[in-house]
Amino acid sequence: MEIRDASELRKSSAPGGEGATLTPLHPVQGSEGLVSVDLWVIETGGSVSTHKHGEEHVIFVISGMIEVSGGSTTSVVREGGVVYTSSAEAHGIRNRGNEQARLLVSTPLLVRSDRSVSGGSTSTSFWTGSTLKPEDLNAEQSADRPPARIREQPSAQPPAQAQSRQNEEESPPDISGLMKRGSDLVGVQRPERRKPPAPPVEEQEPDAVDDEIDAEEQDAQSNLMELFVAFEGGIRDKPPGQGFGSFMVQAPGRKPVIKRVEFGDNFTTQQSEYAALIACVEYIIERLDATGRGPEQVQLDIRSDSSAVVNQLLGNERVKDAALRKRLDQAVELLSGFADWRIEWHDKSESARLLGG
């Protein structure tokens, strides 16, 4: 057992990004282990740039509010949230709150990374990722040696036997079977990718069928029209009040279309936000129908300054209010008709820039 003072460990903190610092809690210099635990502190407006590495992460938000980006998806995670990133998955973090964000990061050291070899070094190689290359992995898999196994540790061993056993187990034990799979961990949920079903094909040789499906999917993707969408909603007077909203729809190379909408009395802010999104999607479907096209030919890139609406649509937050749940279900049903859709959060200043004051 080892007990350390966190204030002493902070003396070894190192920059981890813009306005961000990393403090290794375990392992530290002179210790070893199969799991590392780090404390990330990100100041207001600070960020950790998008990066990826061979290790996976489990990130627990101790305090504050962060925005986690990965691929085409961005989600807002508040205090008490847990984020899981898999091996080699690109991810970046930005402090989106008005206070310091503190994150506890657990990383299994199950690959031969710079960090696991150097005994807890906080060099930049940790941020750029593992030094294990695909060809190295293939070489390890093809090596002529039995796989490592977990062995029970006896209560006492003669020194000679213990030394013999240490030499026998040169490679680290394979404990992947004891770890939860990514699907078992709580992480950032991504919007479901929806594509039109492939048309039936006649029975052919397996390779020929695969080639034909791949070609059809590539053609379908190349023929999709992408629309950029932004929306916001609000109320006048105290809640419930008079609801209103606005939305913007823009096709590549075209001027944006901006619409203002009114919803009447007895609206909450969140109800107005959903009403604005629904009005926007219905407007898009109406215009597509007028030009002889359908939503299955379109993918939507949606932005909103409402973290609640974004997380509810992504499935990160539950909706308990029945009236609000009805609006959420209506929005999801409308969006399900499109070839693909994704939604990301942006700041209110970006809404003002896109939609006007």
Image: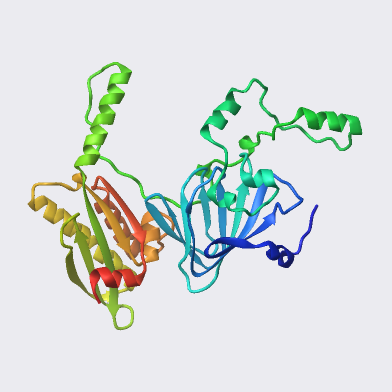
Query: Is 172 left, or right, of 237 in this rendering?
Result: right
Q: Kindly tell me whether residue 40 is visible in this rendering.
A: no
| Rendered image coloring scheme | rainbow
Is residue 266 rendered to the left or right of residue 163?
A: left
How far across and how far down the image is residue 264, in percent? 21, 75
* Residue lying at 71% horizontally and 62% vertically, measured from the top left: 9
Please tell me which residue is depicted at 78% across the width and 34% down the height of the picture: 152
In this view, the residue farthest toward the right is 158
Residue 299 is left or right of residue 315, and the answer is: left
Quadrant of the rendered image containing residue 306: bottom left
Residue at 15%, 62% in the rendered image: 255
Q: Quadrant of residue 242?
A: bottom left
Q: Position of residue 95 (x, y in %)?
A: 48, 66
Q: Which quarter of the picture shows residue 169?
A: top right
How many numbered marks, from 0 up? 0
Which of the pair 294/35 is nearer the observer?
35
- Which is nearer the eye, 47 or 243? 47
Q: Is residue 121 left or right of residue 48?
A: right
